[in-house]
């Protein structure tokens, strides 16, 4: 009751304030209708500074569209990553998403004030161009019906102009444009019919003046001076191609996927309590678990349940009574994880509990193990607090081990179990490399294998790098990342046209074999994890190009531990700046002749920076087996 009385008092106070403003306008132009139009004009003039801020903010948003479209193309289907990358972009460009709502809020406040003010502003003559603006059209009828019709037409006119001229609205899709139009016209009709005609006149005048203001702002602050529309169109085309590919795939697979997923979902829960579950985001991730899983199956009778979100995952061919596989997409996985009943859950996917994927609501004693698909710094390449909600982390080296311990202390986190594990994928690669032997070359072979991150070698310095190397001293193989081939094929065609006739240059587009990687004498890369695999497997050096580093955690320096990715660069090779790539040939010469990068030296570095070389799978599997034995005794 008290709240209602306060609300009535506030509305009355607002009404009195706006009635005074109306009287002031009426004293200048003693005509009810023209006084309302004058008030509308003055309110627009007062809002000019805010309109200018919104104009600049809208320009800033459209300027970001090419980058945002690139983010959507790169992380299509991964809403968490898109949201995270967009947030970083907003922060970098100092864009304020809520600023565009300020005029809307002000308009609503003024509208409420006009409605209440006209109730308090009582005069005898409310006729304007033959229409009584003191009447409510829905009740008065007659000629007053023109007011809602004109209000709707003015809103339609304003939306049409905005959809073609407004810097931000003109770049929105048709659905958003028509949605805005429908809401505006509907609101205008409502206002026109159910409030006094004076409010309808205010709304009509406001819509027309908004159009005038829009043209004035575009003349004074021309968006074309700030926005690269060519880049914007290219980014739209790139995004459209990705959307088309995904739509085609979904239309072909959707029915089969849904049927298969429903069957596997029911089958998964049919088995009740489980001992251990592995989760894989897509085909190809089994290799990170392979040796651990095979050791457990070989040494025990434990049944392993393996979930994958890829219906084409090759792991389905390995299914058996003790290795049960399931196809569950990420949407269905959200519910599955909440209902999970197992002793141990093993994942390579970070951000547990931060986004959609949560810890089980059924059991609070499940041990969640994070097994990374690389040996990088988790503090650098994952989002901040990405692994806070795991119980156990399989660590690859002292750098990762120490940074997790330091994080726990710095952020007052619950201590985790840290297993000095290593990396079984490198163990497998070492074994394959030793079995196949090495080839002898007439000329040293240099392999260039850039990352897929933005501003990689191919984007910013490939020509001067190739010009330096293709001097007759080396054979050069360029091996782009598969994602780069998918998204930037035109760029690769340009490189092929320029260097393809050189007999010492090969552009490799086939990734079916690692022979090229194993046989190269020197690797050149930027921040790709291939460097660690190459140098630790072959015991050969890497030349690093210091392109801009991809940092998922901008606060990584809060932890006083040098990330592995940074520390290792000048241990297994030499780093040079982008500006010095014309000296790449001389640097490669040094790498091939310097004893600091001999096989013996590289072996010592490998043993220092990688746990349990050759036995990591056994270490990881034994930890899991022992933990399951402990669970069975409870």
Image (cartoon, grey):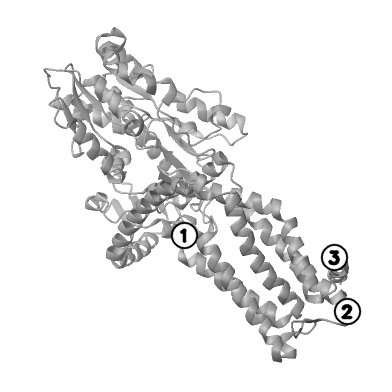
- Furthest-bottom residue in this view: 142
Regarding residue 339, the answer to whether it shows in the image is no
Closer to the chain start, of discs 1 and 3, is 3
Percent of width and height locating residue 362: 52, 56
Closer to the chain start, of discs 3 and 2, is 3
Regarding residue 496, the answer to whether it shows in the image is yes
The residue that mark 1 highlights is: 335
Percent of width and height locating residue 5: 88, 71
Judged from the image, the secondary structure of the residue bearing numbered disc 1 is: helix
Say left or right for 123 vs 386: right
Toward the viewer: 589 or 101? 101
Which quarter of the picture shows residue 477?
Answer: top left
The residue that mark 2 highlights is: 123
Q: Can you say which quadrant of the picture contains the N terminus?
A: bottom right
Dot 2 alpha-carbon crowd within 10 angstroms: few under 14, some 14 to 19, many 20 or more = few
Report the residue at 65% width, 75% height from top.
188
Say left or right for 42 vs 543: right
- All told, the count of numbered labels is 3
Which quarter of the picture shows residue 534?
Answer: top left
Judged from the image, the secondary structure of the residue bearing numbered disc 2 is: loop
Say left or right for 542 vs 73: left
Toward the viewer: 144 or 421? 144
Closer to the chain start, of discs 1 and 2, is 2
Q: Are marks 3 and 2 in contact (CB under 8 Å)?
A: no
Percent of width and height locating residue 271: 37, 59
Q: Nearer the viewer, mark 1 or mark 3?
A: 3
Toward the viewer: 78 or 257? 78
Report the residue at 28% width, 8% height from top.
594
The residue that mark 3 highlights is: 21
């Amino acid at each position: 009751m008290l709240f209602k009385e306060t609300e009535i008092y506030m509305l009355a106070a607002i009404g009195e304030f706006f009635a005074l403003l109306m009287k002031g306008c009426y004293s200048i132009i003693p005509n009810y209708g023209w006084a309302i139009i004058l008030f509308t004009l003055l309110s627009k003039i007062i809002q000019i500074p805010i309109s200018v801020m919104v104009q600049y903010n809208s320009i800033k948003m459209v300027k970001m569209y090419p980058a945002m479209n690139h983010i959507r193309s790169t992380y299509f289907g991964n809403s968490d990553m898109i949201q995270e990358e967009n947030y970083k972009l907003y922060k970098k460009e100092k864009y304020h998403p809520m600023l565009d709502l300020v005029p809307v809020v002000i308009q609503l406040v003024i509208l409420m004030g006009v409605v209440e003010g006209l109730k308090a502003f009582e005069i005898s003559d409310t006729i304007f161009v033959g229409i009584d603006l003191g009447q409510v059209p829905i009740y008065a009828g007659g000629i007053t019906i023109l007011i809602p019709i004109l209000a709707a037409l003015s809103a339609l006119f304003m939306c049409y102009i905005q959809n073609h001229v407004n810097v931000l609205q003109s770049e929105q899709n048709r659905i958003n444009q028509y949605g805005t139009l429908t809401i505006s016209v509907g609101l205008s009709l409502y206002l026109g019919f159910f409030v006094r005609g004076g409010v309808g006149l205010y709304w009509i005048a406001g819509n027309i003046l908004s159009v005038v203001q829009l043209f004035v702002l575009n003349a004074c602050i021309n968006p074309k001076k700030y926005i690269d529309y060519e880049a914007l169109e290219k980014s739209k085309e790139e995004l459209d191609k990705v959307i088309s590919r995904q739509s085609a795939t979904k239309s072909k697979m959707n029915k089969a996927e849904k049927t298969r997923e429903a069957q596997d979902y029911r089958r998964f829960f049919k088995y009740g309590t489980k001992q251990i579950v592995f989760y894989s985001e897509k085909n190809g991730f089994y290799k990170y678990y392979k040796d651990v899983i095979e050791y457990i199956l070989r040494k025990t009778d434990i049944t392993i349940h393996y979930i994958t979100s890829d219906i084409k995952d090759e792991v389905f061919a390995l299914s058996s009574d003790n290795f049960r596989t399931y196809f569950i997409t990420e949407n269905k996985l959200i519910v599955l994880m909440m209902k999970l009943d197992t002793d141990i859950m093993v994942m390579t996917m970070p951000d547990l509990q931060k986004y959609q994927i949560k810890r089980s609501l059924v059991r609070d004693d499940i041990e969640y193990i994070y097994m990374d698909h690389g040996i990088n710094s988790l503090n650098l390449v994952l989002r901040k607090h990405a692994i806070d909600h795991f119980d156990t982390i399989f660590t690859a080296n002292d750098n990762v081990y120490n940074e997790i311990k330091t994080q726990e202390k710095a952020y007052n986190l619950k201590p985790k179990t840290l297993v000095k594990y290593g990396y079984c994928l490198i163990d497998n690669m070492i074994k394959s490399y030793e079995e196949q032997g090495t080839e002898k070359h007439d000329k040293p072979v240099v392999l260039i294998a850039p990352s897929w991150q933005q501003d990689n070698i191919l984007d910013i310095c490939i020509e001067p790098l190739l010009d330096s190397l293709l001097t007759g001293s080396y054979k050069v193989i360029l091996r782009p990342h598969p994602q780069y081939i998918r998204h930037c094929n035109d760029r690769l065609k340009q490189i092929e046209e320029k260097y393809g006739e050189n007999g010492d240059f090969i552009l490799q587009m086939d990734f079916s074999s690692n022979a090229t990687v194993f046989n190269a004498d020197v690797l050149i890369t930027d921040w790709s994890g291939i460097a660690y695999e190459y140098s630790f497997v072959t015991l050969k050096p890497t030349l690093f190009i210091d392109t801009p580093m991809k940092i998922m955690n901008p606060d990584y320096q809060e932890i006083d531990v040098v990330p592995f990715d940074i520390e290792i660069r000048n241990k297994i090779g030499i780093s040079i700046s982008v500006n010095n790539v014309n000296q790449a040939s001389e640097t490669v010469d040094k790498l091939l002749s310097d004893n600091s990068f001999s096989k013996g030296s590289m072996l010592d570095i490998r043993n220092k920076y990688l746990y349990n070389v050759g036995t990591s799978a056994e270490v990881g599997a034994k930890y899991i087996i022992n933990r399951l034995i402990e669970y069975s005794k409870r």
